[in-house]
Amino acid sequence: MRQAPARKEECYMTAENIVYIPTLGRLGNLRKVVPTWLEQDIHVRLVVERYEYNDHAKLKREMRWGEEVVVLTQPLSGRGIGYVRNFCVQHADKTGNVSIIIAEDDTKPLPDSDMVALLDEADKPYVVGVGVVRAIYDLFTGGKISKMHGAILCPGGWGMQTFAVNVKTVLRLGNYDPRLHTMGDDPDMMMRGVEAGMPWRVHCDAKVAPIGNRYDPGGVSARFSSLEQRKAAEMECWAMLKKRWPDFINLSGKSPRFRWKKLYDKYIPEWHEYSALHGGDLAAYDNSPIEGENDLSCQSKLKLNTSATQSGMKANISRQTSSCRQY
């Protein structure tokens, strides 16, 4: 397991194992969630609105969290989740992190999880991101997920509550879209990765459990005065996604949905070969050549390879340190 380097007082040194937790109005959740990340030897960066900074700084003192917990303020307030995740990736890039975890404030790692495995997987070249698994995924797969280990190709929209991303890859894909203020920024990034020939992954040894319900007070709901207002904002985001991905978003049914299989079939037609749920093996993707003319994913890898090599998007990229104010 990778260990975070020591930090100097008054200087914010880059820790290798980092989770960013965007949070709003959920101090009670953080009392439960943050310790579970620290138990995993992962440092925590709480990303908060400016007007809530003092509340979170006070919570940090009350809980006696040390330098392993940092409170970061967003540059601008009230911009929504797409903007916040965009900021997290930019901040991680500036502080020298190759991969980071981004987690919601209403999920926590289970004790038998290996959350550092998410970061190790996201360190690999040609990885966009890798999500966690939840118990409900067994219902989707006939109990297969709980019997599997390691990272597998994700054939649907799983692992979006908590996930690790490769910072450089996400930046090359344009980073998270700040215009997607209420929902959709995470599947949009997953779809951009698939479009570039890079399948989304989930790690069967990284497990989380929810500690609340979807529309509980705080979080995204804190930005709206009513559930109806939030749902209207969600539909605005669905409309943006439909315009961007007209062939892969269905708005005609009772509820909007993504057409993941159609997306994979178009951009990674051999995806079954990489999917453990379909008898394949993700290692076949990781070990496939980066040069070739017949394989779509190889062509996509080849397009990224030149810039990737120049900027060091390899698993052995050296970590850098950066100074900033220690909150």
Image (cartoon, rainbow, N blue to C red):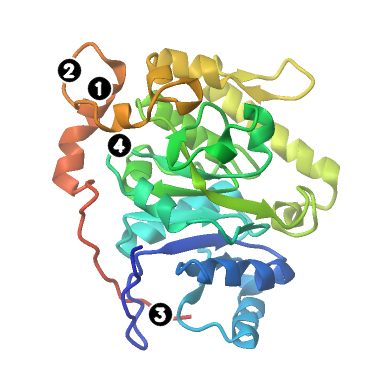
Between marks 2 and 3 in the image, the one whose residue lies nearer the viewer: 2
Q: Position of residue 324 (x, y in %)?
A: 36, 76
| Label whose residue precedes the other's in the sequence (1 or 2) | 2
**Could you tell me if residue 307 is visible in this image?**
yes
Residue 319: % across, % down: 24, 63
Mark 2 residue element? loop
Residue that label 4 marks:
126
The answer to whether the residue labelled 1 contacts the one labelled 3, judged by CB atoms less than 8 Å apart, is: no
Q: Which label belongs to residue 298? A: 1
Q: What's the residue at 80%, 54% (across, down)? A: 216
Residue occupying image coordinates x 31% and y 55%? 98
In the rendered structure, which amino acid carries the disc numbered 4? Tyr
Local crowd size for mark 1, using a 10 Å CA cut-off: few (<14), some (14–19), many (≥20): many
Return the disc, 4 or 1, that comes first in the chain's sequence.
4
**N-terminal-most mark, 2 or 4:** 4
Find disc 3 in the rendering and name its residue: 325
Q: What whole-number distance in Å separates the C-alpha atoms at marks 3 and 4?
A: 33 Å
Residue occupied by mark 2? 292
Disc on the earlier residue, 3 or 4: 4
Q: Quadrant of residue 248?
A: top right
